[in-house]
Amino acid sequence: MMSNQPSSPSQTQDQDYELFKKKLVRLVNIDLDYYKEAQMKRRITSFRDQAGINSFILFVNQLEKDPVLKKKFVDYLTINVSELFRDHALFAKLEKEFIPQLLKRSPRLNIWSAGCSIGAEAYTLAIILDKLVPNSKHRIFGTDLDEEIIKRAATGVYSKEEVRQVEQPILDKYFSLKDNKYHLHDSIKSRVTFKKHNLLNDPYETDIDLICCRNVVIYFTEEAKQKLYRRFFDALKPGGILFVGGTETILSHQAIGFKLSQTFFYEKPL
């Protein structure tokens, strides 16, 4: 016998959210099944409520009709916060230990900034390489899910806040101050390319010497993180390095095949 009891509010909200997720992946190619549900639901609800919409279905319908709101939402969801030389001590280790180690094996490095946001990390890597081996040619590419943020990254223009970790001699050498913004010189900007890429679904390149994926996976489920780290392992050359964020630890690194070189630096054994 079928129950005539009405659905509870929580059941209705859950169904609402499930339908929202299905429509969202078609609309902006972001699959929320890869993200921790409780945290993402809170973030999305906060944005939705501020937009004056009281259900997930009404919200996704509005996103379909309103490109400005859709862009704001994608920017909000992909958390585009970054700055050059963020976690200065870790980049110093990269400069003094890991990149020289990689250069001994290959004169031309292939480096990927995964989840590059405004390009700060990719340009930091280009500056470090210019300091270590001036005028040498390396390949540095940054990828991100957010097409608009990639366009911004390509400009190489940063606010005072975004370069606050950069030492003055580096600012003087590699940037010009115009209209209260720091403009990266073309000599460094031209060494980095950017493209749109979905870390969870799109194919990965291979034969990479260094992958930097920092402060990107904070809202991913453990299952999604493991998938990501295994794919990074496969993308690296033997001896290649994965550099993660200052609050991130890969507890399963041995099972994946990584060797922990130092905290936040994982090596694919030779």
Image: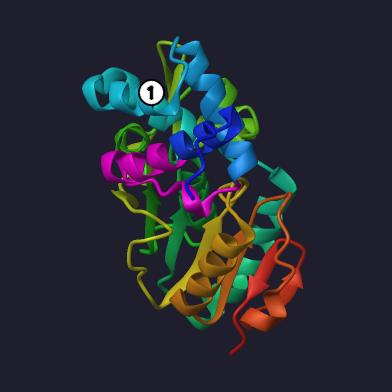
**Number of dots carrying numbers:** 1
Instruction: Looking at the picture, tell me which residue is in the foreground, 124 or 70.
Output: 70
Residue indicated by mark 1:
59
Residue 175 left/right relative to 244: left
Residue depicted at x 40% and y 10%: 179
Residue 28 left/right relative to 136: left
Is disc 1 placed on a helix, strand or loop? helix
Rendering coords of residue 177 (x, y %): 45, 19
Magenta stretch, main secondary structure class? helix
Residue 114 visible (yes or no): yes
Residue 229 vertical position relative to residue 37 in the rendered view, above or below: below
The residue under label 1 is which amino acid type?
A: Phe
Residue depicted at x 37% and y 37%: 153
Residue 75 vertical position relative to residue 180 in the rendered view, above or below: below
- Quadrant hosting residue 248: bottom right
Rendering coords of residue 232 (x, y %): 50, 70
Residue depicted at x 63% and y 76%: 267
Rendering coords of residue 129 (x, y %): 50, 57
Rendering coords of residue 151 (x, y %): 29, 35
Q: Locate the C terminus by quadrant.
A: bottom right
Q: Magenta stretch: residue 35 in it?
A: yes
Magenta region? 18-36
